[in-house]
Image (cartoon, rainbow, N blue to C red):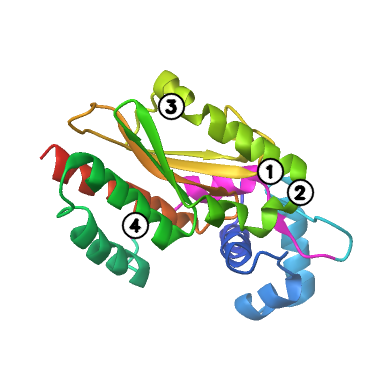
């Protein structure tokens, strides 16, 4: 059981690492929480023993593990004020999705909007095909400079369409973090997908694929809202 401060430190590590893509040190967090670096290091040691964060190399700060990301995602507070990202998303979705034209173009517009807003790879099922956009975003992330990891990402993409149809995630929003992915477990990716009803299927999907280092609060909100907007435009 984590204390309130340990939870907040984990949240800060997840959010700071998503922003800067480098390990988060105790001195930075000490300033944020107005305590000593020694206190932060002690709390980090607890989080590390719980398997929620790790130290990539000696003398570095800490980064979240898949387990740490899962804890963070499971404990997100949905009742937070609308952010600038959320307001921008609503405007973009209203312009490019709800008034997008024919069905397949509406879905493509939705994916392209997600790519613009999340800087991830965007995906959606259109009938029996998987539409993807933003590959340069995905492979431009600092995580994917290792050839073996790139191959794992490619393997995941090669198998994503049949897996989606076979697994048919039935939650309005599903999040698969790192090793939780059924394929490409070593790719260091997170898949965030929203199910929506369309004239193609009652189980169509839209979402993003990116590194596990994500701004989960904003990305999950964007994917969920995109699914809702598509359902309103195509089925409502």
- Is there CB contact under 8 Å for labels 2 and 1? yes
Foreground: disc 3 or disc 1: 1
Q: Which residues are magenta?
A: 60-79
Distance from disc 1 to disc 4, alpha carbons, whole Å, reads 25 Å
Label placed on residue 113: 4
Q: Is residue 81 above or below residue 64?
A: below
- To which residue does mark 1 refer? 150
Name the quadrant containing residue 60. Answer: bottom right
**Residue 204 colored magenta?**
no
Distance from disc 3 to disc 1, alpha carbons, whole Å, reads 21 Å
- The residue that appears at 23% across and 47% down in the rendered structure is 106
Distance from disc 2 to disc 3, alpha carbons, whole Å, reads 26 Å
Q: Mark 4: give few (<14), some (14-19) or many (20+) Cα within 10 Å.
A: many
Q: Nearer the viewer, residue 140 or 235?
A: 140
Distance from disc 2 to disc 4, alpha carbons, whole Å, reads 28 Å
Label placed on residue 146: 2
At mark 2, the secondary structure is: loop
Foreground: disc 2 or disc 3: 2
- Is there CB contact under 8 Å for labels 2 and 4? no
């Amino acid at each position: 059981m984590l204390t309130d401060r340990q939870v907040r430190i984990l949240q800060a590590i997840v959010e700071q690492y998503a922003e800067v893509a480098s390990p988060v040190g105790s001195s930075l967090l000490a300033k944020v929480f107005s305590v000593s670096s020694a206190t932060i290091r002690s709390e980090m040691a607890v989080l590390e023993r719980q398997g929620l964060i790790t130290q990539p190399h000696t003398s570095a700060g800490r980064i979240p593990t898949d387990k740490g990301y899962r804890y963070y995602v499971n404990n997100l507070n949905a009742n937070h004020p609308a952010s600038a990202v959320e307001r921008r998303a609503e405007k973009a979705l209203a312009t490019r999705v709800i008034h997008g034209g024919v069905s397949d173009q509406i879905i493509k517009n939705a994916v392209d909007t997600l790519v613009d807003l999340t800087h991830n790879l965007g995906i959606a099922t259109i009938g029996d095909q998987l539409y993807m956009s933003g590959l340069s975003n995905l492979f431009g992330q600092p995580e994917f400079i290792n050839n073996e990891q790139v191959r794992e990402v490619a393997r995941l993409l090669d198998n994503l369409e049949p897996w989606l149809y076979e697994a048919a995630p039935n939650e309005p929003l599903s999040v698969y973090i790192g090793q939780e992915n059924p394929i490409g477990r070593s790719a260091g990716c997170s898949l965030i997908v929203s199910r929506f009803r369309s004239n193609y299927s009652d189980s169509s999907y839209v979402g993003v694929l990116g590194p596990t280092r994500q701004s989960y609060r904003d990305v999950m909100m964007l994917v969920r809202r995109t699914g809702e907007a598509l359902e309103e435009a195509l089925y409502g």
